[in-house]
Image (tube, helix red, strand yellow):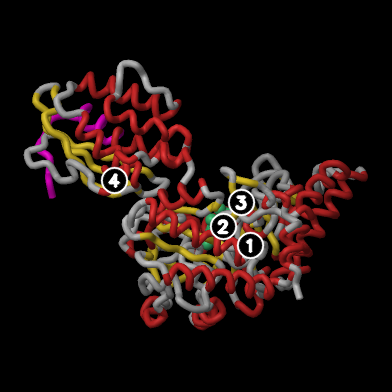
Amino acid sequence: MIDWAKLRADFPILDQQVHGHPLVYFDNAASSQKPRAVINALSHYYERDNANVHRGIHELSNRATAAFEASRERVAKFIHAKTSDEIIFTRGTTEGINLVAQSWGAKNLKPGDKILLTEMEHHSNIVPWQLIAERTGARLVYLPVTGDEGLLDLSKLNELLTREVKLFAFTHISNSLGTVNPVAELCERARKLGVTTLVDAAQSAGHLPLDVQAIGCDFLVFSGHKICGPTGIGVLWGRQEVLDAMPPYHGGGEMILTVDFFKTTYKKAPHRFEAGTPDISGVIGLHAALDYLDAIGRENIFKHDQELATYAYDQLAQLKGVRLFGPKTGRAGLVSFLLDDVHAHDVVTVADQRGVALRGGHHCNQPLMKKLGIASTARASFYFYNTRAEVDRFIEVVRGIQKFFGS
Amino acid sequence: MSDDLDELYQQVILDHCKGPRNFRVLEGANRKGEGYNPLCGDNYTVFLKMNGDVVEDATFQGSGCCISKASASLLTDTIKGKTKAEVKALFAKVHDMITTGAVSDEGVGKLAVFAGVHKFPARVKCAILSWHAVIAAVDGENQPVSTE
Ligand SMILES: Cc1ncc(COP(=O)(O)O)c(C=O)c1O
């Protein structure tokens, strides 16, 4: 048995009052909170080991470098990469996708090629592709979403996933619908046609076990800050042979073998893609976060998230005048909803005054919102430190909001 | 509900957000302005009929939260009969009030109900959204406005 209450106590930030009420933090899909183990790893690094990596010969630099590279090994294990050379540290999911679009895309896309995305992508898995499409003459195509229930319309896949498609990029878990996509199946279909795949694991990495071999993708990206790690650090995983064939992304120190005034030769992956002094403390903090998550077990976390989300969904469904988004069953740990005649921002403002942190808006999914005919939703997103009692409190607050606005 | 909330969502505001005034396309409008908030996707179009420098009639269309809708509703009521200079002077006062909470002696009329917004920094933009549309409209040129 996992002692969830004991785990919750590892998060100092959760123990506070907001506007005179105990904090109920339900904005985990935007960013998770950090356990003491991660905060301690950061201060330990700055108090004991801080120095630049890969450059010094002195003791502190050696320690920093060892800790930095140990984290790379840890990440490789976390997602079952073949080697740690396949792990590139980025600033986050967004930078990982931009890196692939700019480096892989510039080299492999040409006029007439298609990039297949889905209608539920986050802006960060749309805009980088628009930028590279503009530069290369490739075109974007979208796999539709079925409507409020928020599933990918797989019946359209045959028609859309054709040989002109060079890259298929899709999210593992939708940040606004809570849909869990059949990533392994999508990758297999793509692989049969020789289509390169990218999985946006921003919402899944810290919530369920990830195995890039079993998924069968070519690239996978995620952010540290959503999975108990620090902000400003993220991971791009790519198959080694794919990475080694890619040109550099940024130029600078750390990524070179030799530099001449007019010509430079580059290191192999991962260092080729890590120009300049990296976010060393972030990388070290991420290591602590992954250790922390795996001590709990991501399969346990997923079960817990899912139970809370299902409970919240069912409770909301019992209220009058609530429109719910995302699948009825099998959803990930979040619920998006709208109250009749109450705008999401008004819901969030009132909830905040009651200590409940929600997110309201388009969730960086504007095209999806347009398709669903809405401007925004309110969203409650959960993590393992959240409780059923907090969901009860949230529902009580939602009832209060309905009463307040007389809907 | 807490006092701050009651101040934010005053009865007048709730009333205007549930039953917005001037919520229609204005036939014969000669000015139009848009206000868009990329953060939430809220957007309003304000239609004006101007006679020289004077706002003869004002209406709006669009969608958004309670605060932004009530603001557009009260605002289109308030600026009728005012000159361009008066509208701009009023905006300066209202802007000041919404960001600091201070209600100026000069009076902002019914718009004083938005003073409570200053305690909610994330909502200041909502209260000001339709103002941007109005300012764009009074600053614009006279031209037939398509009411499609
Ligand atoms: C599905 C998805 N993709 C990408 C991102 C972008 O992540 P980041 O802002 O950490 O780069 C997010 C988070 O906002 C997300 O939920």
- Quick one: SS at disc 1? loop
Q: Is residue B23 left or right of residue A194?
A: left
* Ligand 1 shown in quarter: bottom right
Q: Which residues are magenta?
A: B132-148
**Relative to A261, is A283 above or below?**
below
- What type is the residue that disc 1 sits on? Asn
Q: Earlier in the sequence, mark 1 or mark 3?
A: 3
Cα distance in 3D space between marks 2 and 4: 27 Å
At a point 85% along the width and 41% down the height, the residue shown is: A47
Residue A103 seen in this snapshot: no
Q: Are marks 1 and 2 in contact (CB under 8 Å)?
A: yes
In this orientation, which residue lies closer to the viewer: A111 or A14? A14
Chain letter for the residue marked with disc 2 in the picture:
A
Numbered circle sitting on residue A23: 3
Q: Earlier in the sequence, mark 1 or mark 2?
A: 2
Q: Quadrant of residue A70?
A: bottom right
Q: Quadrant of residue A291?
A: bottom right
Queried whether the magenta region covers residue B146, the answer comes back as: yes
- Quick one: SS at disc 2? loop
Cα distance in 3D space between marks 1 and 2: 8 Å
Q: Is residue B73 left or right of residue B48?
A: right
- What type is the residue that disc 2 sits on? Phe
Queried whether the magenta region covers residue A12, the answer comes back as: no
- Quick one: SS at disc 3? loop
Q: Which residue is mark 4?
A: B17
Q: Are marks 1 and 3 on the same chain?
A: yes
Q: Are marks 4 and 1 in contact (CB under 8 Å)?
A: no
Cα distance in 3D space between marks 2 and 3: 9 Å
Local crowd at mark 4 within 10 Å, few (<14), some, or many (≥20)? many
Cα distance in 3D space between marks 1 and 3: 11 Å
Cα distance in 3D space between marks 4 and 3: 29 Å
